[in-house]
Image: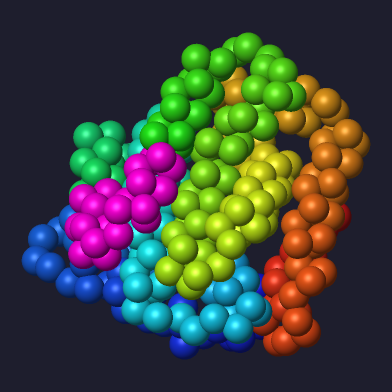
Amino acid sequence: MNNIKCIVEDELNLVDRELNSYLCREGQIYEELKEFIFSPRKRIRSLCTILYFKALGKEISQNFIDILVVGELIHNASLLHDDVIDESKMRRGNVALWAKYTPTVSILSGDLLLSFATEKLIKLNNFEIIKFFQECTQRMSEAEIKQYFLRGIRPTKEEYISIAEGKTASLFEAIFKSCASISNLEIEKAKKFAKNFGILFQLRNDLDDISASVDKQNKIFTLKDILGIEKTYVLTDNYLEETRRVLEEFPNSVYKIGLMDLLKIYDR
């Protein structure tokens, strides 16, 4: 992963610099949020997006960076909320914020990050992008609620994929569609890649032992419980191939190679 991140290190540093600008304020919670956001992290949404658009020859403008920052803020806010919902006591190797203080602190901290994301969106002054992220946060919330009411109930494959699309893929989609919009690229192609990659990301995450333990604790059935391990891997392979297929028409470049190497991480 580090070798892939080195390809777009300058752009990722710009994202981190913008994120840090929101957290350089007085107050204990800002110190906690800085530690939370800058603890060992993948920045997978920003990494994947930058590689995709640079592979198509697009420059990474300030507006592009701002969109990535919005995505990172929303993602981290969702983690703070998810830890409360799932009662997960650890996050990124550290004690979860709700366990260290109270669930209220974690929820309000997530809301604070969402307020920063809203501020950044307003400054972008682009109604289409605002709409993309509004639809995204609505879908994320609806998927979490749907999953909550399915606790202890084995969902259908279609219900599971629907939740994965809402919880995870929708944020990838919002970021990619927004960046395609300002880059004058076809939005539907960017959305297709983002959707397939987002579902692939969620499927692989659900196969992880730590994630599986949390799901079992919360009586959440994932795809391997519905289809079995082997059929889940087959479906994961299908999403992986669909994602790779989008890249076939891309010109050869270090960024395309970076994307292909990124996808190899999700191969079995």
As displayed, is residue 22 above or below residue 128?
below
In the picture provided, is 73 more to the left or to the right than 199? left
Image quarter hosting the C terminus: bottom right
How many numbered marks appear? 0
Q: Which residues are magenta?
A: 113-137
Q: Position of residue 184 (x, y in %)?
A: 50, 70
Asked if the stretch drawn in magenta spans residue 116, the answer is yes
In the picture provided, is 50 more to the left or to the right than 213? left
In the picture provided, is 161 more to the left or to the right than 261? left
Q: Position of residue 137 (x, y in %)?
A: 39, 40
The answer to which image quadrant residue 254 occupies is bottom right
As displayed, is residue 136 above or below residue 143?
below
Q: Residue at position x 78%, y 31% from top? A: 224
The answer to which image quadrant residue 99 occupies is top left
Image quarter hosting the N terminus: bottom right
Residues 122 and 229: in front is 122
Whether residue 16 can be seen here: no
Q: Residue at position x 60%, y 23% from top? A: 220
Give the prevailing secondary structure in the magenta stretch: helix
Whether residue 59 can be seen here: yes
In the picture provided, is 7 more to the left or to the right than 81? right
Q: Position of residue 140 (x, y in %)?
A: 45, 36
As displayed, is residue 84 above or below residue 191?
above
Q: Position of residue 192 (x, y in %)?
A: 66, 52
Asked if the stretch drawn in magenta spans residue 238, the answer is no
Q: Residue at position x 79%, y 71% from top? A: 249
As displayed, is residue 135 above or below residue 69?
above
Q: Residue at position x 30%, y 53% from top? A: 127
Residues 62 and 210: in front is 62
Q: Residue furthest top?
A: 153
